[in-house]
Image (cartoon, rainbow, N blue to C red):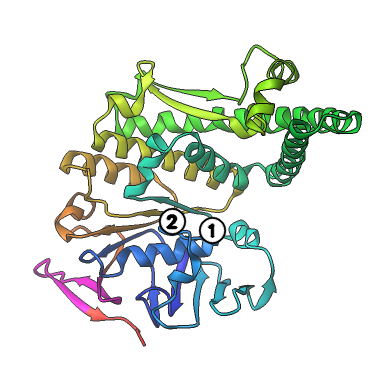
Amino acid sequence: MSVAKLITKNFRNLDGLSIDFHPQLNFIVGDNGSGKSSLLEALFFLGHGKSFRTSKVDSLACHETESFVVSVKDSNERQLGLSRNINSGLTTIKIDGQRYSRLSVLAKNIAIQIVTPESFKLFFGGPKERRRFIDLGMFHVKHDFSTLWKSFNRVLKQRNACIRLDNITSNVNNNSMLSYWTEQFCQLSIEVSALRAAYVSEIILELNCWLAILLPSLDERVTVQYLQGWPQKKSLIDVLISNQEREASFGYSLYGAHKFDVKFLLDNKTIETQLSRGQQKLFLLALTFAQANFIARVKLVKPILLIDDIGAELDINSRTALSKAIEKLDCQVIITAIESSVLQPFLGVCDDRKHSMFHVKHGKVSEIYPDDSECNKSEKAMNVE
């Protein structure tokens, strides 16, 4: 699927926005602070129920407004919407007019992938960021993962509570409870780890294809290491038994599926220490393309790919390689840029590639149309209240 129309009300500075997207390729140009990233944020929010820019949902509303709305009509004529009342804290989810209570319902109907300047946290933000990236893809393609992960987290909380209680007072009943939850914890950890390991293996195959386009000189030197959350050659129960005192001193589970990590290596050294900033961004794009393509193939729902500030970190050669990669993607792509000149590798000179281009200024959006005779651009105001 693709987003045919985006409508916002009181969202950031995009009040009363209605914009029709091209089903394949879209470019959004505007100065810093104009609202172009907010436009991507609205789409991301609808797909994830949260922002990629802030953890404070209420800050997404326009100044001094009590609510905001984001909705889209997709290429299948389905209407998906999400509204938030600031005063009550109530979030309303609607699909074709029917109300739902869980944000996960939206995520099952629209798959949003994004690359922003903050995406470098995948390398520098520690294992938590890499776990979030992998589990996002797992949610879409491993149908049992969501339920299994909820069960695991419930057991993890119970086990941690037993560890803390045992640290305060030692009694037979608590020891028995800890043993019970440890057994459940080990079983679920093994199941979660097996699902993740299979997913990572499949992503690696996809990643190699995109690295061959975006970083051809490095693709054969890149390896991906999956760390399950406890020593590979030891059983989890043995690891937990031998670390009982350490866990008691920390007050929580030190090993298990919640501690997994994925390391991206170049010549057996971490990517972030070997690649330039521009190469790191190309690697991030290759990884995102791999996940998007895999989701589309398995879920049979085409993800929507958002790329914020395409000009940052990427020179003309990198953007040319990226344009070739995007040509091979079978999904909708929405790209922002500060200057339209950085989009030249994607557009060519008066090329006829199917795409739409928009200009954003003070939260108002205009579509840019090419002049066939002189390859100049004119603007036509869109429907903005």
Q: Which residue is mark 1?
A: 48
* Count of marks, rendered view: 2
Q: Which residue is mark 2?
A: 52
Cα–Cα span, label 2 and label 1: 9 Å
Q: Are marks 2 and 1 in contact (CB under 8 Å)?
A: yes
Which residue is drawn at the image coordinates 31% and 81% (left, top)? 382
Q: In front: mark 2 or mark 1?
A: 2
User: In screen coordinates, is 76 left or right of 279?
Assistant: right
Name of the residue lying farthest toward the right: 173
Which residue is drawn at the image coordinates 59% and 31% (left, top)? 259
Image-quadrant location for residue 101: bottom right
User: In screen coordinates, is 235 left or right of 289?
Assistant: right
**Residue 303 x/y as whole percent:** 50, 53
Q: Which secondary structure lies at badge 2?
A: loop
Magenta highlight on residue 372: yes
Which residue is drawn at the image coordinates 35% and 41% (left, top)? 120
Residue type marked 1: His
Residue type marked 2: Phe
**Residue 160 x/y as whole percent:** 72, 37
Q: Which secondary structure lies at badge 1?
A: helix
**Residue 54 x/y as whole percent:** 43, 59
Q: Residues within 10 Å of mark 1 (few under 14, many from 20)?
A: many
Up/down of 159 relative to 367, above or below: above
User: In screen coordinates, is 141 left or right of 327?
Assistant: right
